[in-house]
Image: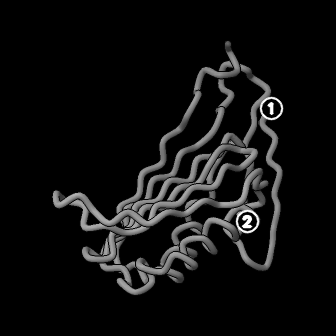
């Protein structure tokens, strides 16, 4: 018999944590990868904005930060990376990372949670709003499909 816990907030859409009583069907977590194109270059080049995103998103997703977000500037490597910001926050449920490429208007984001299903629509809307992303490439990887059987 499946159980669904539903949580709501003014800042996020409904988040559903799916669990099952069959241990062979237990899902350890979900890993959302977002590649954003046509983003606002000034927003991608704003260290404070990257920090704010990493600081605020865990609460929006009803997750728990276990460290202050860490953001660094990288000046590029004369290959395909012209520089930008990379940031990371560890959460009790796993992690969130952001890598910006302002010269290309590109951002790549990972939201990994062991909570079950990740709230992709809320993540998409949030990053579209703060970074002005015009177009997304999105993947959701179901992690630990056999975790309950171990």
Which of the two residues, 66 or 9, is positioned nearer the viewer here?
66
What residue sits 58% from the left and 43% below the top?
Answer: 30
Gap in Å between the C-alphas at discs 1 and 2?
Answer: 21 Å
Farthest residue to the top: give it: 150
Residue 128 x %, y %: 48, 78
- Asked whether, in this view, residue 82 is left or right of residue 16, the answer is left
Residue 77, disc: none
The quarter of the displayed image where residue 143 is located? top right
From this view, report whether residue 43 is shown above or below residue 70: below
How many residues crowd mark 2 within 10 Å: few (<14), some (14–19), many (20+)?
Answer: some
Residue 133 x %, y %: 40, 78
What residue sits 56% from the left and 79% below the top?
Answer: 49
Residue 68 x %, y %: 71, 59
Which of the two residues, 55 or 111, is positioned nearer the viewer here?
55
Residue 1, disc: 1
The quarter of the displayed image where residue 149 is located? top right
Q: Is residue 88 visible?
A: yes
**Circle 2 residue:** 14
What residue sits 81% from the left and 68% below the top?
Answer: 8
How many residues crowd mark 1 within 10 Å: few (<14), some (14–19), many (20+)?
Answer: few
Element assignment for label 2:
strand
Residue 50 x %, y %: 54, 72
């Amino acid at each position: 018999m499946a159980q669904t816990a539903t949580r709501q907030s003014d800042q996020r859409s409904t988040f559903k944590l799916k669990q099952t009583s069959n241990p062979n069907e237990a899902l350890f977590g979900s890993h959302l990868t977002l590649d954003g194109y046509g983003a606002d270059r000034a927003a991608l080049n704003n260290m404070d904005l990257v920090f704010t995103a990493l600081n605020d998103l865990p609460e929006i997703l009803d997750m728990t930060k276990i460290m202050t977000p860490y953001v660094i500037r990288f000046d590029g490597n004369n290959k395909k990376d012209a520089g930008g910001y990379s940031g990371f926050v560890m959460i009790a449920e796993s992690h969130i990372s952001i890598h910006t490429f302002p010269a290309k208007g590109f951002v790549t984001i990972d939201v990994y949670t062991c909570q079950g299903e990740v709230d992709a629509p809320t993540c998409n809307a949030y990053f579209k709003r703060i970074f002005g992303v015009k177009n997304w490439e999105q993947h959701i990887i179901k992690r630990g499909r056999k975790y309950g059987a171990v």
